Image (cartoon, rainbow, N blue to C red):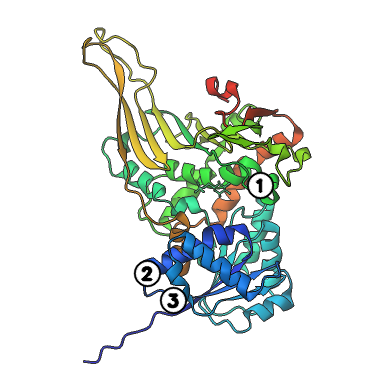
Amino acid sequence: MVIVKTMAKTTTLLIFGASGDLTSRLLLPALGQLLKRDPDRQVTLRGAGTDPWSARRWGDAVRASFASADAADMVDRLGETTYTQADITDVAELKKLLADIHGPLVMYFAVPPAVTMAACTALQDVPLPQDTVFALEKPFGGNEDSAKTLNATLRALVPENKIFRVDHFLGRPTLLNILGVRFANRLVEPIWSADHVQSVLVRYDESLALEGRARYYDKAGALVDMIQSHLLQVLAVLAMEEPVDLDEVDLRDAKSAALRATHIWEDNPVRASRRARYTAGTIDGRPLPSYVDEEGVDPSLDTETLAEIVCEVRTSRWTGVPFTLRSGKALGEKKAQIVVTLRPVRHIPEGLSGKPADGGVLRIGLSPDRIELELNVNGGDDPFALRREVLSTKLGSSTLLAYTEVLSQVLDGDVALSVRADAAEECWRIIEPVLDAWKRGDVPLEEYAAGSDGPAEWATSTV
Ligand code: BG6
């Protein structure tokens, strides 16, 4: 018998925005790691960007990024890689870029949403190679309407299962952790509803500040940068009904249904949201200027660096349970966690002292990944006095970068963990009342010192 070994097809990865920060900081290191993990994977790398980079400058950028992921030796696996200075919103330039590319092709849009939109419009007049996949960075559009327009434009180019709306939170082991914890435990699965859960908090406090990203961040702010995308995806996984299968249809149907049911608490964006901006301070001994004094920031935009909203998932499972989503920058400590607080039990025997405020707390750490169960226990010197104990363990963490997982799914054409068109639109629909209220000035822009936990009042009150 003759065994014919089929060679894996080489995929061309064409990155738009190749001279940008996202490419060098996240995409290229992920590509290096991926090539290292998968010895059979073959990728031809092409870059296109607005900067007039020479071949040498591009080569240096690729090498440095691969080295940052401990994959310097993978540069040779790429063979020849090219960089082209191009305006990707121009039909003629796009035609030139794609002229000698044969599928499979992944076009990765690491560019602002307006450029993605203009490029996708231009691509309607450009013949695409067979097996072309679109990978898009968030935010997908700038509001619900523009997200709908972008989705319609994309659908005219390729089918939905060839479109990756990348959300790297969905590439983290955390997401899979939530699935296992929720659905594989007798202790958790039956209590996952308003009957037992008092409140849910998804918190992503970062000690990182602007990090030179004013051009993007100053127009986005914490609400769009983190809550509209990542944290609503986490909410969807927490709140969804059990999917039959974790594939692209069932998982994404379940998430979308949860998002469709999600609304701002009491439909009152003024009471159910708050925002703040950091002033000068110190983080880990590093002095930090006020946000408004950071390079490239336009103070008149009133951009928030800390945002909090409260949502309700209006289903029979969740109605009445506040889901608080909060994220901010330049905070004293990184706190990335999901906190599920259980309702107090209905009755405690007379002889036990100390009435607990809740029936226990389940915490899932998003980074580092850990799980904690805070329980009411008694025993010790006063055997009938209740106190709290925490059972805590680290969860299996991946050695891969979240973007490596994302890129691997994109190159393999597995869209299960990418954001489907309707979900992207829903996430805008959910936050738009808050954006409008903030624009009208109905919610004050508070302040907190960099390195603090946020405005002092936030620690003791809820929205
Ligand atoms: C990005 C945001 O999508 O996620 C950043 O644009 C944020 O502002 C980052 O810092 C947080 O994710 P991670 O995985 O880098 O902690």
Quarter-of-image position of residue 183: top left
Mark 1 within 8 Å of ligand 1, using the beta carbon: yes
Q: Quadrant of the N terminus?
A: bottom left
- Mark 1 neighbour density, 10 Å: few (under 14) some (14–19) many (20 or more): some
> On the image, numbered disc 2 is attached to which residue?
38
Quarter-of-image position of residue 3: bottom left
What residue is rendered at 78% in x and 38% in y?
300
Question: Is 242 left, or right, of 314 in this rendering?
Answer: left
Q: CA distance from mark 3 to mark 2?
A: 9 Å
Q: CA distance from mark 2 to mark 1?
A: 34 Å
118 and 391: which one is in front?
A: 391
Residue 188 in the image: x percent, y percent?
A: 31, 36
Which secondary structure, mark 1?
A: helix
What residue is rendered at 76% in x and 42% in y?
298
- Name the amino acid, label 3: Gln
Residue 45 in the image: x percent, y percent?
A: 54, 74
Residue 191 in the image: x percent, y percent?
A: 33, 33
Looking at the rendered structure, which numbered label has been put on residue 129?
none
- Name the amino acid, label 2: Asp
- Mark 2 neighbour density, 10 Å: few (under 14) some (14–19) many (20 or more): few
> On the image, numbered disc 1 is attached to which residue?
217
Looking at the rendered structure, which numbered label has been put on residue 42?
3
Which residue reaches farthest bottom? 2
Question: Is 278 left, or right, of 249 in this rendering?
Answer: right
What residue is rendered at 72% in x and 69% in y?
89
Would you place residue 381 above or below residue 100 in this image? Answer: above
- Name the amino acid, label 1: Tyr
Q: Earlier in the sequence, mark 3 or mark 1?
A: 3
Mark 3 within 8 Å of ligand 1, using the beta carbon: no
